[in-house]
Amino acid sequence: MIFTVAIDGPAAAGKGTISRAVAGHFGFGHLDTGLLYRAVGAKVLAGAEARAAARSLVPDDLQGDTLRTQAVADAASQVAVDPEVRAALTSFQRRFARAEGGAVLDGRDICTVICPDAEVKLYVTASPEVRAERRYQELVARGTDVSRDEVLDDVRARDARDMARASAPLVAAPDAIVIDTSEMDVGQAVQAAIDEVARVLGPRGG
Ligand code: CDP
């Protein structure tokens, strides 16, 4: 079966958790496309040129805890404004989306640019304050020394950059189902996404 679940949304809205849970529930593959941009950002921080780094990414580049730092997230959103960087990462994402067995992809432009024909499109969001608090808890749990204000500033700066860029800006696709997780716990958010996928799958896999 070829079946794509496309999930977009701003930083720390819960896309990753929801995507992993949906993929696990239905037995689909999962690609966190933010990792591709983070891997390019990490290479740029290490001295590489962004376009060359994007063209030469290998699966091993997507491993490692350092990709989860704030500095790498920030570098990722800077390289992500370059249409040539984005173009270099497109065909890998599209192949993943149409691989046999079903796929969940999460990112910023999956519903709008990478998989406009996805069978299910979701836009997962939450208020900036709620998202910053979740990311703060995540970073503290990982032992990072940050303040709540720094994390909120970072979330706001990345939102602004991701939404304002000319190439594939972050926006809810007109036909995406919006899941606002501001007032939901993880279980409720995951269930809302699973319900939507099951509705579309219907008798095929319901
Ligand atoms: O986990 P979080 O939502 O904070 O970030 P991420 O999904 O790992 O993405 C990091 C950065 O990569 C974002 O701020 C975007 O600028 C960029 N990105 C993108 O442009 N397009 C995607 N499909 C995924 C990420």
Image (cartoon, rainbow, N blue to C red):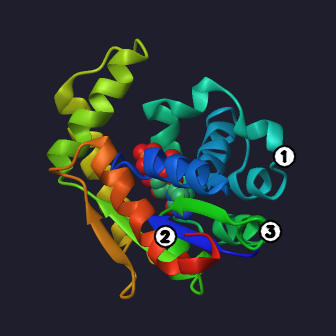
Q: Pick out the residue farthest to the front.
A: 203
Q: Amino acid at mark 1?
A: Val
For the residue pair 205 and 97, the one nearer the viewer reads as 205
Q: Which residue is mark 2?
A: 198
For the residue pair 177 and 37, the one nearer the viewer reads as 177
Q: Residue at x 68, y 53 (%)?
A: 50
Q: Amino acid at mark 2?
A: Ala
Task: Mark 2 vs mark 3: give the one in front.
Answer: 2
Q: Which residue is mark 3?
A: 99
Separation of disc 3 and disc 1 at Cα? Answer: 18 Å
Q: Position of residue 140 (x, y in %)?
A: 33, 18
40, above or below 98, in the image:
above
SS for tag 3?
loop
Residue 84 visible, this orientation: yes
- Pick the quarter of the image with the C terminus: bottom right
Q: Which residue is mark 1?
A: 58
Q: Position of residue 130 (x, y in %)?
A: 18, 43
For the residue pair 169 and 129, the one nearer the viewer reads as 129
- Mark 1: is the Cβ under 8 angstroms from ligand 1? no
* Residue 167 appears left or right of 135: right
Q: Residue at x 36, y 55 (%)?
A: 191
Q: Position of residue 199 (x, y in %)?
A: 45, 76
Separation of disc 1 and disc 2 at Cα? Answer: 33 Å
Between disc 3 and disc 1, whose residue precedes? 1
